[in-house]
Image (cartoon, rainbow, N blue to C red):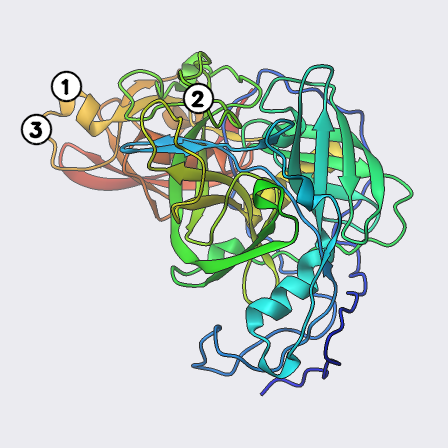
Amino acid sequence: MTNTPEIPENRSTAVPPTPPSGGGPPTTPRPPGPRSEAPAQEHAATQPLAGPPISKPAGESFRRRRPVAIAAAIVAAALVGGVSGAGVTLLATSNDSGSAVSTATTPANVTVNDPDNATTVTGVAAKTAASVVTISVSSSDAGGTGSGVIISDDGYILTNTHVVTLDGAASDAAIKVQTNDGRLLTATLVGTDPTSDLAVIKVDDAGELSPAAFADSSKLNVGDTAIAIGAPLGLAGTVTDGIVSAINRSITIASSAAPTEPESESTTPDEGSPFDFWLPGQENQQAPTTSSSTISLAVIQTDAAINPGNSGGALLNDDGEVIGINVAIASAGGSNGSSAAGSIGVGFAIPANLAKRVSSEIIENGSATHGLLGASVVDVTEDADQADSSTVGASVKVISPGGAAEAAGLKVGDVITGINEVPVTGKTDLTAQVRALAAGAKATVSYVRDGKTGSAEVTLGTLE
């Protein structure tokens, strides 16, 4: 049994601030520009949580009621990123100025009426609430709300690019941050990374802040606890829980900054794709987005309820550590997207390891890097030359001269089936996993050539 402090009934307590988990001077804000693609899976060291750990005896369900350490007030809000998948519509859903719920304008505290029967979820929510903030963004003709996760005690906050750019509509929007103790602070944009839909903002002279602790997302298992904190539909301090439904999932979404796909590594996501694309935050739009630019993301799938208002918020494990940044939901609505309004238990989060790498690079350099394979690929099922193939994967159609793929010995006609032991079932998987790695990273690519399996050690190029 874990030694945890007893809590007086009917009280909310405050979480002491944790040590800094990031730093560095702010850099000149870089408006979203023509970049491309997604996340990185570098192993990040797990940071200590403030206060005693929330743990459970071996074999106990995380849902069992037991005494836990309860602290802090909850305030969070957010958007949810958007996507489309075969058979469903996946949406980057945000709260725009016309859909915000007025009841969410004040902080919400975690009230513990019966501490002896509080659950692990209660403890996690109370402990991490101070690390999640509400972000309000406005431009001359638009506005929206989202969430952010505090990553350092000197004011750096991680969120989604689509939150701070109003789904790609503004590059110089005004940003306000509401902390869970009710302060309203002005924030500046440090940098965006449209390739991973991540961004960093900074508040100055914020006083005490409580940075979140990050888990090593490469160690996640399907079935692990997943707890989301945010303000779905403007309802601040909402906590939902579930499990990790899948790992190494790949999705394709419309870019919030319309990056241009380089010709040297086109995965042709807009031609013959099973995905329908919708502008993030357009809950009632009647026609697909006209943008032809998309990004591929490697994500965690969860059944914890994520709704419009959760974007940029935290997905947490049962120790209160961030395992992902909430970004997108799937909807079973019609093809016109009009009924795509809420959670059906299929949500997505950007893995913590990617979020840590990208945010660190943005803070240090104002931008982040992503890998480039130097090959044009399509799904095996889209390649007439692979009509007799019995292998699922990404078929190589073009090798760029002087690129990483050529240097590693990959050839046209190879079917790539994995990268760093992560299965590749098609072009979206390959693109997402390559973009998840930093420029210059080394990767092991598995492939099938003429019916025989092989592997190649690749040093990735740099996505420009």
Q: Is residue 459 in view from this perspective? A: no
Tag 1 residue? 384
In this view of the protein, which residue sits in the foreground, 163 or 180?
Answer: 180
Element at label 1: helix
Say what secondary structure mark 2 lies in: loop
Q: Do the residues under discs 1 and 3 have CB atoms within 8 angstroms?
A: no
Q: Which residue is mark 3?
A: 388
Q: Which residue is painted at 48% across and 28% down in the image?
A: 283
Real-space Cα separation, disc 2 to disc 1, in angstroms: 25 Å
Label 3 to label 2, Cα distance in Å? Answer: 29 Å
Query: Residue at horizontal 28%, vertical 24%?
Result: 378
Residue under pointer 2: 403
Nearer the viewer's eye, disc 2 or disc 1?
1
N-terminal label among 3 and 2: 3
Q: Amino acid at mark 1?
A: Ala
The disc labelled 3 sits on which kind of residue? Asp
Q: Which mark is residue 91?
A: none
Instruction: Please say if 233 is above or below 426.
Output: below
